[in-house]
Amino acid sequence: MPFFYGIDYTYVVYVLPAIIFALYAQAKVQSTFARYLEVPNSYGFTGAAVARSLLDRNGLYDVEIQMIPGSLTDHYDPRSKVLRLSEAVYGSSSIAAIGVAAHETGHALQHAQGYAPLAVRNALVPIANLGSNLTWIFVIAGIIFGLPSLINIGILFFIGAVLFQIVTLPVEFNASNRALAMLSGEGFITKSELKPVRAVLSAAAMTYVAATIVAIAQLLRLLAIRNREE
């Protein structure tokens, strides 16, 4: 029996190229973030100040801003209406910091305005978690017991995880577009700073593209395994 749960030909053919691209995307976002973390914005705004101002200008006074540890751990929690900024973003007045802060503010605006793709993504979270946790249990059991039907159940679970990644793309792209529009349109950056802010957000977006490619590659691998076992 092939080494179906580790590195076999299906992993090399389908997943390994996607993993390599994901590693490149991660290195790209880290290097771009680090580069522009050293470049101060012209007006001296901190990430927290930009987020608070943008939230207030859009009437989101009830959204709290918190500082959290870690690097690139910034996120918006729609359940508690809390915008969490990493230490490197919260108090920094860099180009990278205000770009990330505005991006996360974009997610808060999406939530407040009922942005449909965000609602769909949030609804897919439990399905995606199930897919990530249960897929390989069914796939391995199907191979051990010679039951392709179990593999098919595992694939159905994983399809939910893939859909979550796909729906995440428009959510993230829209948040970045909102960030660029707000920063440039409301006087937080100069015209010359628009390009570096876009570079930071584009690099971050690449990681979501990479995650989607990895998920699709994993799905193709599962289908190949299923076809091999039939």
Image: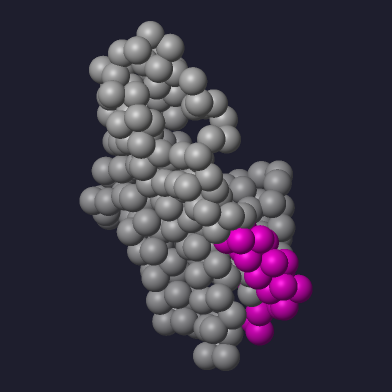
The range drawn in magenta is 24-47
Q: Quadrant of residue 140?
A: top left
Q: Quadrant of residue 26?
A: bottom right
Q: How is the image coloured?
A: one colour
Which quadrant holds the C terminus? top left
| Residue sitting nearer the eye, 174 or 217 | 217
Is residue 230 among what the camera can see?
yes
Where does residue 170 sit, x and y in percent of width and height?
33, 59
- 220, above or below 40, in the image: above
In percent of width and height, residue 213 lies at 43, 52
Taking the image as drawn, is residue 107 in sight? no
Q: Residue at x 39, y 64 (%)?
A: 173
On screen, residue 5 versus residue 117, left or right, reads right
User: What is the x, y in percent for residue 32?
Assistant: 65, 70
Identity of the residue drawn at 54% across and 26% down: 3
Image point 42% across, 82% down: which residue? 185
Does residue 116 lie above or below 81 as drawn? below
